[in-house]
Amino acid sequence: MVRRTSQSHEPPRAQLLTTGILVLGVVVVTLFPASALALVVATFVIDVGVQGTQVNNLAQLYGLDASAHSRINTAFMTIFFLGGAAGTASGVVAWRMGGWTFVSMLLLAWSLAALAVSLLHHRRS
């Protein structure tokens, strides 16, 4: 018997997958900080996770109100860039405190937080 899910369950599942991919990439670069190959692989995997998450977020937001796409996109991109600025600032502080080790641990903490939020959202849907 094949279990069918409603389309309302698909975005949270996709979000869980993309944030999981993000965490996987961060784990790779955290475990192998001196490997150029790990850095290349992790960069690709992290980018896939981040881009997939962003596309999934936008798809969900655009499904809210067709007449408000411009306002929704403005709010989303503003929050997205504020989050990027906060991540960059905290990364600089982490670098000053402990170099690459602290930066990768901070990235792992942010990524695990995103995965936790995705998991909570998936369970609620």
Image (cartoon, grey):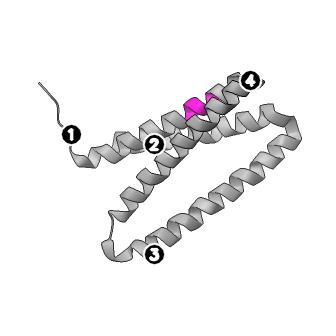
Q: Is residue 4 something that shows in the picture?
A: yes
Q: Name the residue under label 1.
A: 5
Label 3 amino acid? Answer: Arg
Numbered disc in front, either 4 or 2: 4
| Nearer the observer, 75 or 119 | 75
Q: Name the residue under label 3.
A: 71
Q: Distance between the residues labelled 2 and 1?
A: 18 Å
Q: How far apart are marks 3 and 2 (CA)?
A: 24 Å
Label 2 amino acid? Answer: Ser
Tell me if mark 4 has few (under 14), some (14-19) or many (20+) residues whose alpha carbon lies within 10 angstroms of its own: few
Q: Distance between the residues labelled 1 and 3?
A: 31 Å
Q: Is mark 3 on a helix, strand or loop?
A: helix
Whether residue 30 appears in magenta in the rendering, the answer is: no
Q: Earlier in the sequence, mark 4 or mark 2?
A: 4
Q: Distance between the residues labelled 3 and 4?
A: 43 Å
Q: In the rendering, at what x and y percent does residue 7 appear?
A: 24, 47
Q: How far apart are marks 4 and 2 (CA)?
A: 30 Å
Q: Mark 4 points at which residue?
A: 35
Numbered disc in front, either 2 or 1: 1
Q: In the rendering, at what x and y percent does residue 111 appear?
A: 59, 39
Label 4 amino acid? Answer: Ser
Q: Is mark 4 on a helix, strand or loop?
A: loop
Q: What stretch is highlighted in magenta?
A: 23-27
Q: In the rendering, at what x and y percent does residue 76 appear?
A: 51, 64
Q: Mark 2 points at which residue?
A: 118
Q: Earlier in the sequence, mark 1 or mark 4?
A: 1
Question: Quarter holding the N terminus?
Answer: top left
Is 10 left or right of 41, judged from the image as shown? left
Q: In the rendering, at what x and y percent does residue 68 appear?
A: 38, 75
Is 56 left or right of 95, judged from the image as shown? left
